[in-house]
Amino acid sequence: MKRKTELTGKVVCRNDPEYCQARRNWNPFTNAFPKLFVFAQSKEDVANAVKWARENDVPIRIRSGRHALAKDFSQTDGGIVIDTSHMRQVKVDPSRGIATVEAGIRVGPLVRMLAGKGFLAPFGDSSTVGIGGISTGGGITAIQRTAGLISDNILAATLVDANGEILHVSENENPDLLWAIRGGGGGNFGIITSYTFVIRPAPTQVGIFQIIWPWEQMDEVFDVWQRWAPVVDVRLGTILEIYSKSNGLLRSQGIFLGHASEMKRLITPLINVGCPDRVFVHEVSLLEAIEFWAPDEPLFDTQNSTWSSAWAEQSIPAKGIKAIRSFLEKTTGSESNFFFLNSGGAMNRVDPKDTAFFWRNTKYYAEWDATWTEKSETRENLALVEKTRMRLQPYVTGSYVNVPDLSIKDYGHEYYGGNFDRLRRVKAKYDPDNVFCFIQSIPPAPYCGCDHDDWEQPV
Ligand SMILES: Cc1cc2nc3c(=O)[nH]c(=O)nc-3n(C[C@H](O)[C@H](O)[C@H](O)COP(=O)(O)OP(=O)(O)OC[C@H]3O[C@@H](n4cnc5c(N)ncnc54)[C@H](O)[C@@H]3O)c2cc1C
């Protein structure tokens, strides 16, 4: 008789005192009541947890940094959460320019450690986001125009599949899976226990800037930013953030992989728009720039939030800007905001079919979220974010899988564009029984009678 698999690692069940803390996510709106958590200490613990879940017919969710933005992605009621956050080892090989990183480390500690050793790796705007989740969904960052997306930097990975088998993923081993995890979104193909990334020599000094304007100048500032940011020197990554009217913050900032004096010249069109309240331009070390972009922050937010996102392949016209303003005037949450990040450069030089991340012809990324504290405010905030998505629909394309929106029905094409069908075939090959299934996961392609090995070919 086959022996039943035992759970290994640190197991937290509903009656344990650690349970309440274990179920907290960054966004409290996404918290659920799983049956248990396994905090894996090794890839073998992960493998045992997958086998146990299958033997006991318990739905699986995967978690690393707890920053999932929508419900059901990294926790579900009654499920097992396989959490890699205790696995944080990093091995740097300076001679080969690579780092092998366990999936449980967070972005901030990783990129600070690499910067301390003289290496540059892409980082987002939050130090507490998990490498486990951000990397496989894409990973948009201030230096993506030079270094590409985080997923473009994945050379190899170790992954526990739906049978609890440990797979090596690289150009030579399971290459279709490498293609899929470079943008195919978290939780779809297995549990990634480590990634191997390209790392680059770090510049000694970089330029940073910040400009703050009175909120009322948002239309003008946004329009100048959206025409300037996509075409400015690719060494300059810049965001524009417009908070709710009640908050009143309107700010742009950026990182330039070069000298501040050169950056100052590049940002002149932005400084000249409206009447800024504050402009600062500094030359700093890479470590200071990371601190500026992704400062230390609490692991948990206190407010509920709901999100949507899209890609801009052309400038948003006046009607669209009106929709943005209307959202920011109506939302009651003080932290509700619109966020834009310029793309282009290295990010857009990759062919859309070369990796699972499809959106390679964009000028910039747009995201908006509404925040609230009282349960009674939930419905109106979900509706406002959705209404804004509908109003912006004519001017934008697709959506970003790492900032998922459960109102999107055709999510496969919105997140993965022309790569969705191939992703479904890879899913059918590695997870035909759809073990890794959640609210917006990639469904396996229906079996069509052909040889499995052909399924990975592009359509
Ligand atoms: C404050 C904040 C700032 C952010 N800033 C950025 C940014 O600058 N750039 C950007 O691109 N995104 C950003 N995001 C979005 C972020 O990339 C996603 O929320 C991401 O999924 C979080 O990963 P995680 O491991 O922290 O979250 P988790 O909640 O642990 O997981 C999220 C998803 O990833 C999957 N996943 C997690 N670990 C693994 C694993 N080991 N193997 C396979 N799948 C896994 C889960 O199944 C789940 O679907 C931000 C989010 C927040 C909340």
Image (cartoon, rainbow, N blue to C red):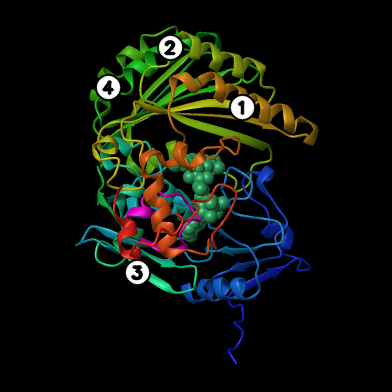
User: Which comes sooner in the sequence, label 4 or label 1?
Assistant: 4
Mark 1 neighbour density, 10 Å: few (under 14) some (14–19) many (20 or more): many
User: Which comes sooner in the sequence, label 1 or label 2?
Assistant: 2
Question: Which residue has dot 2 on it?
Answer: 317
CA distance separating discs 4 and 1 = 29 Å
In the image, residue 230 above or below residue 14: above
Secondary structure beneath label 3:
strand
Residue 38 location, quadrant = bottom right
| Residue at 55% in and 9% down | 216
Q: Residue furthest bottom?
A: 1
Question: Which residue has dot 3 on it?
Answer: 168
Question: Which residue has dot 4 on it?
Answer: 231
Mark 4 neighbour density, 10 Å: few (under 14) some (14–19) many (20 or more): some
Q: Indicate the amino acid at tag 4.
A: Val
Secondary structure beneath label 1:
helix
Q: Indicate the amino acid at tag 2.
A: Pro
**Which numbered disc covers residue 385?**
1
Residue 396 location, quadrant = top left
| Residue at 43% in and 52% down | 424
